[in-house]
Amino acid sequence: MTRDRDKWTQIGTTTNRPDTERTENTMTMNLIRLTKFGRGRIALPWRRHLVAGALCALAMLSAANAQSVSLLYSNHAGKAPQSAVATLPDAVAVTAVCNGSGKLEVIVWQAGTALVRKGSHTSASTCQNSVAITPLNSTTVITANADSAGDYELAAWKVSSKGAISQLGTTTVTGTGAAIQYISIAQLDSTQVVTASVNASHALHVTSWLVSSTGDITMEGDASPSGAFGYTSIAGLNSSQVVTASSETTSADLDVIAWSIDSTGTVTQQGDATAGAVTNPQIALWSTGTVLTAFSNGSGDLELISWTVSSAGDVTRQYTGKAGTASSVALCVTTGSEGGAFTAVAGGGSDLDLETWTSKLVQDFTDNTTSQYTPTSCANIPGAGGAVTSAITTAYADSGDDLEVAVWEVSGPPPSSK
């Protein structure tokens, strides 16, 4: 696919708003589509406030003047003040949450003509400050969760064809010296994952892990750059490189760092590049050799920046897109001929705005809002919605801190055609 990387373009949004009644597991919703100069927007009524978490992926797109987003179905679970989500083949989503008892709980969801809760497992592991999840292969996910004592645990989980989930191996990192504040995880290949963590002393650690066929997890390498950091996010670039996006504590500037991982798991810091002040930066693989970051910038607005990363780890800033006010952002990217970027933005009041982007033009919105809510993650979910080959799934906590999971369809022309 050929991309004009001059600018980023926002081409569609969805806003979720509370209402007196809630509709779940339904294929039809009251929706309004507004199209203006190639932009689609849908407003959907919703009863509950939206808080944390977002998992996303773009659907197969049909021909229209603008992309649009529509809700397919939703479901919910118990308390989940912290959440993250990953997906497996055959429209399976797996959420990892810090539940109301402060324990790690992993839940399997099947998306088809409805979103159905399948198996779940509550671990004995304490889960308080942060939780993350990534797929390892077609049947296994890896979770990472931190507690207030400064320890964090990695666990491997097997998902059966019927949605049952069982815990395999675990490993715990203790004595980090300060409580882990943030943790993120990315797949390197089918046997390796890499974590990025920041503790209360603002030290960033990038750690590689080997996962055996039976789920045993072994630490291989660890590296820590100089400086003090806040929030961090990590994305796999290829089978031997990852990239982190972190906020510096002194300046609040974005610091994008490339890391190499050799055949023994040794982690080596490569190049880096910086941008202006950010809040809770997210990072995702955009295309071969390119990553995309999304964040709330120093002005409180949504901003996206693309970066090329060479095999030697040189990080070069490419193009930038901006939209209106956003207190927090979750980011995902799809690949292939329909490839594009998708952001889930916490809006004002109880709004959750879902936005689609291309790489051609920049368009600012006049209807973005602010909020204290914090979307957390995105991932692809192929096969959701029956005939839909892929869809957006969002996971978040409502006003009562219960977990809510929704599946959305994106329709319209491929971003590459604009």
Image (cartoon, grey):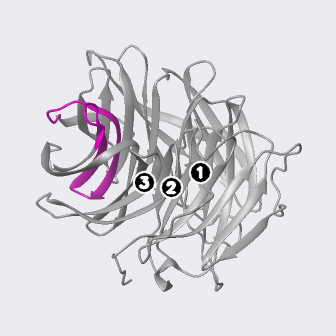
Q: Amino acid at mark 1?
A: Ala
Q: Nearer the viewer, residue 374 or 119?
A: 374
Q: Amino acid at mark 3?
A: Asn
**Residue at 49% over, 39% down:** 157
**Residue at 58% over, 40% down:** 165
* Residue 348, picture quadrant: top right
Residue 379, numbered label: 2
Compared across the picture, whether 399 is left or right of 418 comes to right
Residue beneath label 3, please?
137
Q: Please identify the dominant SS of the magenta region.
A: strand
Q: Is residue 241 magenta?
A: yes
Alpha carbon separation for disc pair 1 and 2: 9 Å
- Looking at the image, is 355 positioned above or below residue 218? below
Q: Residues within 10 Å of mark 2 (few under 14, many from 20)?
A: many
Q: Nearer the viewer, residue 171 or 407?
A: 407
Alpha carbon separation for disc pair 3 and 2: 14 Å
Counting residues from the N terminus, which is met first, the one under dot 1 or under dot 2?
1
Residue 84, numbered label: none
Label 1–label 2 contact, CB within 8 A: yes
Compared across the picture, whether 204 is left or right of 270 comes to right
Badge nearest the viewer, 3 or 2 = 2
**Residue at 62% over, 63% down:** 13
Q: Nearer the viewer, residue 169 or 292?
A: 292
- Looking at the image, is 3 positioned above or below residue 31? below
Helix, strand or loop at disc 2? loop
Where is residue 329 drawn, in percent x and y? Answer: 49, 48
Residue beneath label 1, please?
93
